[in-house]
Image (cartoon, grey):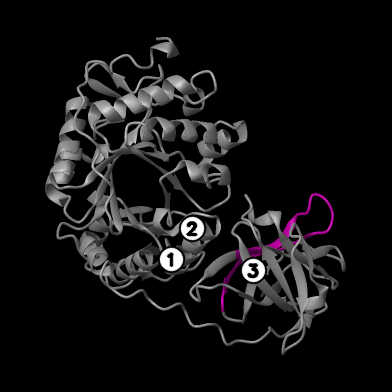
Amino acid sequence: MAFAQIIVGLSTLSLITAAIPAAAGPVVEGYLPSHRGLETTLATTGVAPYSEVALSFINPDTAGRFVNGDAMACMTDRFLTPLPTATVRNAIATVHAAHARAIGALAGALPPKCAGDWAQAISPANRARTVSALAALADAQGFDGLDVDIEADLLARLIKSGDYTPFVRDLARALHAHHKTLSGTTASYVDGTIPLDAITAFDRIEVMTYDDNVQGDEEASMSQFRSDLYLWLGRGVPRDKLMVGLPFYGRGYGTYSYAYTYRDLVAAFGPQTGDIIGKVCATCSYVTFNGPATITQKTALAVAKTGGVMVWEMSEDTPDGTLTHAMQAGLKAAPPPPPAPSTSGPPAGRVLNTPDARAWTIFGSKTYTLVPEGRGNIFEATIAKPTENTWDVGATLPVTGAIKAGDRIVFAVRARLKAADPDTQLDVPAVLEGVKSPYGEALNGTMVVTTQWQWLRVTGVVTADHPANTLNAALQIGGAAKVIDLGAAVIVDEGPAS
């Protein structure tokens, strides 16, 4: 079928109801994947805790259609069969009966096999037809708004082609004309982040503060939650338009299965009070998740700092709603205090650089000053506007000592953020990299910078020899608007790792 026929199938659908206005208080949104069973999950889980339910995911089929006759073209049930449009309308009616808003979520991380190519659908030649079809779908089914959840490689491809931002701007205008909302879902990692020029198109930005870890990390740690929250505030998202995510699932490594719903996790291992089963390390077997206490703390922090929370996803909670109750408790709780600053000093060992703040060179920011301070000079760098990438603004200094393969290296920096909110926290990538192209990395990691002066460090074992003066130590301080103070840095060689 030609792409020009994209709207075929919508005309037979009836207009349902006017959009329900957004909640005045904190938004609590639950995602509900269609393959979990829309009607079954809504009946067993209930809508009451949520002010919004995002029915997920809507994709075009290979002909570019969102509706095909009396069925969704590519929104499937648990048997991967396209859902009848009546099933979707019934689910929306159930959500509305609970005085909640129904959102249609688009795309998703892993579109089903029936999905067509979003890059084709939103290309300049097809964008107007796709926008018109989506606006008509929202009207006909009775959605109160749509959510663009284009992720990962597809998102990076659409940003590179220049098609992402024009699409969401046009879709927002079309939905707003029908008194409906548009939200945008984003991650915070490289190639998973929506572009800065798209932010203003959305009524809300929903940040997936989860699924950004590898073996050796915790899944969706409290520290990541704080850093992602402040990253997006620093990228210019107004507080009341920012939402942050809560995972109702876990990740397993080593001898454990990789994916667990919280329901299955409790069934297998019993009720949980913490966030870890086993021990976290790069070679360990463990399961990592958010237990009830962490969900309560995250919700409380989100309510204090942002417009609300979103849950991935509703059906994954225990039958008695353990995490849902924890989330509800967080809506009324005081936010947790920030972590206490580290009291450790600089590392000991063979020093490979000049440990003086005056050794820093700042690039990419026109606003930086050398400021006298009680323990010596500090560099104060002001990034007045957010940048697309963290590496757009950096601080570097030379590594003057030689390093042998197999040595354990510590890159330590004394630093702080200057911010009106004392809870502010941001992740700063830290690397040792070559001074010449291709600028290969000898060491990399992340430093968590807060508003308190402290020594921060990244540690690792280098895998190659590096002669003197062939490496720079660098901090990537772009991304969010910020003022960051940098004291001395110390790069230490602790000798052979084993």
Q: Which amino acid type is marked by label 1? A: Ser
Looking at the image, is mark 1 or mark 3 earlier in the sequence?
1
Callout 2–callout 1 Cβ contact below 8 Å: yes
The residue depicted at 42 percent of the width and 71 percent of the height is 279
Give the mark toward the camera: 2 or 1: 1
**Is any atom of residue 352 visible in this view?**
no
Residue 227 horizontal/vertical position (percent): 50, 64
In which quadrant of the rendered view does residue 365 lie? bottom right
Mark 2 / mark 1, whichever is N-terminal: 2
- The CA span between labels 3 and 2 is 27 Å
x then y, percent, for residue 239? 43, 59
User: Which residue is identified by label 1?
Assistant: 221
Q: SS of the residue at dot 2? A: loop
| Few, some or many residues within 10 Å of mark 1 (<14, 14–19, 20+) | some
Q: CA distance from mark 1 to mark 3?
A: 25 Å
Furthest-bottom residue in this view: 374
Q: Which residues are magenta?
A: 428-451
Residue at horizontal 65 percent and vertical 70 percent from the top: 484
Q: Amino acid at mark 2?
A: Asn
Instruction: Check disc 2 and report the residue beneath it.
Output: 213
Residue 314 percent location from the top left of the image: 25, 51
Secondary-structure class at tag 3: strand
Tell me the quarter of the picture where residue 158 sits: top right
Q: Is residue 181 visible?
A: yes
461 in the magenta segment: no
Query: Is residue 442 highlighted in magenta?
Result: yes
